Amino acid sequence: MTSTNGASPAHHETLLRRSPNADSERVLVVGAGPIGAVLASAMLAAGHRVVTLTTNPAIARALREHGFRLSGSTVHAHVPAGDVVTELAPGGEPFDVVFLATQPTQVEDAARTVLPALTPHATVVCLQNGLCEDRVARIVGRQRVVGAVVAWGASMIEPGRYERTSEGGFTVGALDGSAGEQGLERVAELLAAVGPVARTTNLIGARFSKLAINCAISTLGTIGGNRVGALLKYAFVRRLALEIMSEAAFAARAEGVRLEKIAGTIDLDWLALSPADADRRGRGPAGLALRHAVLVAAGFRYRRLRSSMLAAIERGRPPAVDFLNGEIVERGDRHGMATPINRAARDVVWQIARGERQPSLATLRDLFDTTR
């Protein structure tokens, strides 16, 4: 689910003040999609030395010609893009902090690309939804990796033009506490240009909570072909969301993960339906209506959010569903636990990606009916 930026005039003034580290640290943002663009533009406005790497020539051209053009309910800005590259030159000046803002399907390739360009004590930050930190750690080293859970949303209108679709900040943490305190501090300072930053010593718990939410919101948005708010008006869509998130919560418990509520999102421990709470015909506990009300409120908050997976499919790219619902299915299989809703949702997304089905409310309804 997903996603504060220079929202208010006061905060915008803060962004324009030069950071004391701006001249000494070199920052790379890999990916100029919505998340990478909002982050890069905010850090540039704050005076940091930022290079943006995008392999998309249309985006690179638009950024060089027009800069970052940002809009939304609380932000309207035009930020010069600075250095925009389509590849890293061998032997170039190395980077102190690297933000990986690619799709999960591209994150390992991105990590391999940046590895030769890191300073000895560089920090590599994973911004992806899913559980990507371990994948990146195997490439760049566990001691370098920091995870940043994004609690806001954005979309790309066209190359170089972006819309901030919801407000929020970040929750950051290191893998097993292995990254140095200094690395976490500098990451937090950089991310503060976008929004408030919370620290956690339970990164996997925060990641799993966000994963559960994205398994519902991003995947159902892909299947339904519409923005979150429009879809969550329907009771059967909210029911599917509850079941998807409940299976994710059960998988986390089976893995021994303590779920952590992250800023601006839902308490999964409370939201999850136990197997005894409800059957597939829709009966449920007295608290079910309250759970539906929470999802209605979430739908309103993220009413402009559009699934990045759907956007990827529309651009002819593979969806990241194996990094979302697929992770839940894999862990369910590992522990002998059924995850029928996540499994079915994953399969439908792949059918849409292959052109076998069309994203629509009717496709969502069919998913609901066939999983009763």
Image (spheres, grey):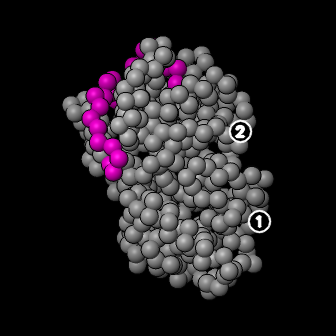
For mark 1, does the 10 Å Cα neighbourhood hold few (<14), some (14 to 19), or many (20 or more) residues? few
**Left or right placement of residue 30 versus residue 60 in this view:** right
Q: Which residues are magenta?
A: 72-97
Name the residue furthest front: 10
Which quadrant of the figure has residue 252? bottom right
In the rendered view, would you say 146 is above or below 213?
above
The quarter in which the C terminus is drawn is bottom right
Instruction: Name the residue carrying label 2.
Output: 201
Indicate the secondary structure of the residue bearing disc 1: loop
List x then y, in percent, for residue 83. 33, 23
Residue 92 inside the magenta-drawn segment: yes
**Left or right placement of residue 247 versus residue 370 in this view:** right
Amino acid type at mark 1: Gly
Residue 266 inside the magenta-drawn segment: no
**Left or right placement of residue 183 versus residue 252 in this view:** left
Query: Which mark is nearer the camera, 1 or 2?
Result: 2
